[in-house]
Amino acid sequence: MKNFIVAFVLAAAAFAAPRAALAQAAPGEPLDRIVAVVDEDVVLQSELERQVNRVLAQYANSPQQLPPRDVLERQVLDRLILQKLQVSRADSTGVKVSDTEVDQALTGLAAQNKMDLSQLRVAVQQQGMDYDQFRRSVREELIVQRLRQRVVQGRVQVSDAEVETLLKNGALHRGQLHLGYILIAVPDGATPDQIETARKKAEDAKQQIDGGMDFSAAAIRYSDAQNALEGGDLGWRAADELPQAFADAAGTMQEGQVSAAIRGPNGFHIIKLIGKREDGAKVVTEYHARHILIKTSELVSSEQAEKSAAAIRQRLANGEDFVKVAKETSQDDATARLGGDLGWFSGDAYGSRVGEVVKNLKNGEIAQPFQTEVGWHVFQLVDSRSTDKTNDLQRDQAKNIVFQRKAEDEYESFLRQIRSEAYVELRLPGATSEGSTSKPGAP
């Protein structure tokens, strides 16, 4: 899943603070006091301490790069508040994530780290994090991800005219960019004084970076973006998935260079060009194949379906015509009457398992039976070809660019909306209501 969920879980697994490192309560003071009330939910001191200590552990070898403890706590608390608001809104609007989906996410995470689930559990516990708590964190991130998808899909539409305009203007930025990002936010309807305060803060951040402060440390100290605690790292993104001002600025920068503050509708932005890479021509291999499907069901076990597929494969090996046998035996309603013809498709269009099989076949060759989630298949590769998909992919890229730009704006607006509608009472010493404004999302 860069998917947001993988980045979050990896961070949690790598940097969760050991229980012994949690701050101890003063004599007579309960450890789990409430540090924020968020509608009908609360943020506990223990939650805040876990997340703060995660960041401290990440910077254990360079603690001087971190902001003062109270500033770091406020950054973390703001993030926890917005997380709870999103989970609450998801719950009230019927967004659900099943146990199976959580298991799949954990299995994928384990596989990426070359582990199985039992090894992942041990690794999490060795980092001092309760596994059930870790699992709840995964569920919450999946819920937030699904909420974002629902909000965006309900609000964002992309017209053919918008795609054509982007293509005709020659405004497509080719290649990919790896950026660091700092946002100094201004509230909706900001006064001139508020804008000036934000501008001075952005200039101070830039001066500190120019003076030798690590960019990721500056992001933690200054940034109001949701990825501030990850050092502002946006990872690799297609240039046109980024705001145009960012892509334009990065186009004139050298790797390692940091921009001046860029004024935007929601505040001042500072970017660092970490890396760039160019796109080449998009030549893809397409396959023309036929298949026969034997479905599994409550009445037909996987073993029975496999035996039927093996018998069909033997008939074909004995010289029977694939089209004729497919019409007689295939249980794929969409292709059986066509003799199992799937037409031309790119490698993984029918799933990774099909792609893996078809890529290893020669023209005319019939694969041994193999299983997918719908049943057992017998595949024959008819032909293959290399096709230049550059133009098609550019159109798809342009559509995705327009969608992503609108999606970021819409979800950022949504976050400001739910934050403004929420009741939030800060009980963290030194916190004020003025500082509890929600953090807009990173681009």
Image (cartoon, rainbow, N blue to C red):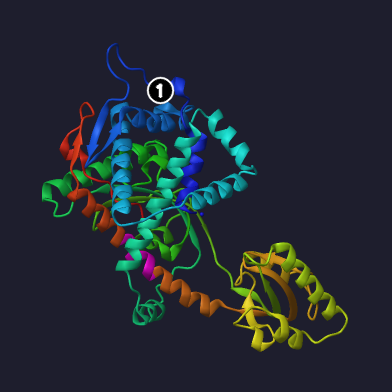
Q: Decide: few, some or many residues near mark 1? Use Cα within 10 Å; few <14, some 14-19, many ≥20.
A: some
Q: Quadrant of the C terminus?
A: bottom left
Residue extending farthest to the right is: 318
Location of residue 195 with respect to 157 vertically, above or below? above
Position in image of residue 214 (x %, y %):
42, 37
Residue at (29%, 11%) from the top-left corner? 27
Question: Looking at the picture, how far across and down is residue 354, in whole percent?
Answer: 67, 69
Magenta segment's dominant SS is helix
Q: Residue at x 41, y 58 (%)?
A: 250
In the rendering, at what x and y percent does residue 411 appear?
30, 58
Farthest residue in the front direction? Answer: 299
Residue at left offset 64%, top offset 43%: 116
Residue 224 in view: no
Q: Left or right: where does residue 21 sit relative to residue 335?
A: left
Is residue 133 highlighted in magenta? Answer: no
Of residues 332 and 179, the one nearer the viewer is 332
252 relative to 201 in the view: left or right = right
Q: Is residue 408 magenta?
A: yes
Instruction: Identify the amino acid type marked 1.
Output: Leu
Residue at (54, 30) in percent of width and height: 125
Question: Is 342 drawn above or below residue 19 in the view shown?
Answer: below
SS label for mark 1: loop
- Vertical relation: 189 (above or below) 432: below
| Closer to the camera in the image, 155 or 313 | 313
Determine which residue is flagged by label 1: 22
The magenta segment is 402-409
